[in-house]
Image (cartoon, helix red, strand yellow):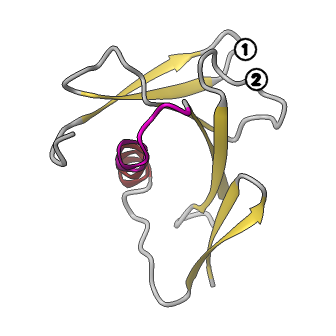
Amino acid sequence: MNDKEQVIFEKFIDDHGAFLTSLSLEDNPEVIIAIMGENLNNDHPSPAGFGKQMSVAMPEKDTGKITEVKIWFSEQTEDAVLAYVIQAFFDARFPDFEAHENTTMGISEPGKITVRQN
């Protein structure tokens, strides 16, 4: 993977009416690396072929509300590629987010990372 490779974001509505975003790389756009969904119900089913999941709770800068991003991915995805596309998503989705000395990140429950700004 070339570090400068473009990540492709494609928004869609799944069979349950949820707005999701698929992430792939420009050199192989038909291979979806991860699927993201925001503020979904806990019982929202995983997309077919994406057996692993985690979530990240992010504070919204302007409102102080928390946006929970559910991330589905395949076990076969290389860690570096997965990290790259997830970082690209968060950079695009939360462009005003700034980590500083009062920013903390921790595991609040299994499979869930919570970001806090105190």
Q: Does the magenta-highlighted stretch encompass residue 33? A: no
CA neighbours of label 2 inside 10 A, class few (<14), some (14 to 19), many (20+): few
Q: Position of residue 62 (x, y in %)?
A: 53, 65
Q: Which residue is mark 2?
A: 45
Q: Is residue 101 left or right of residue 31?
A: right
> Which portion, as a residue range, is magenta?
75-84
Q: Position of residue 21 (x, y in %)?
A: 48, 28
Say whether marks 2 and 1 touch (CB < 8 Å). Answer: yes
- Quadrant for the C terminus in the image: bottom right
**Residue 2 image-quadrant placement:** top left
Q: Residue furthest right?
A: 43
Q: Position of residue 114 (x, y in %)?
A: 67, 65
Vertical comparison of 80 with 15: above or below = below
**Residue 18 image-quadrant placement:** top right
Q: Position of residue 61 (x, y in %)?
A: 52, 67
Q: Is residue 68 visible?
A: no
Vertical comparison of 45 with 84: above or below = above
**Residue 72 image-quadrant placement:** top right
SS category of the residue bearing label 1: loop
Per the picture, the main secondary structure of the magenta-coloured stretch is helix
SS category of the residue bearing label 2: loop
Q: Which residue is mark 1?
A: 16
Q: Is residue 23 visible?
A: yes
- Quadrant for the N terminus in the image: top left
**Mark closest to the chain's N terminus, 2 or 1:** 1
Q: Which residue is located at x 72 percent, y 35 percent? A: 40
Q: Which residue is located at x 49 percent, y 31 percent? A: 76
Query: The disc labelled 2 sits on which kind of residue?
Result: Pro
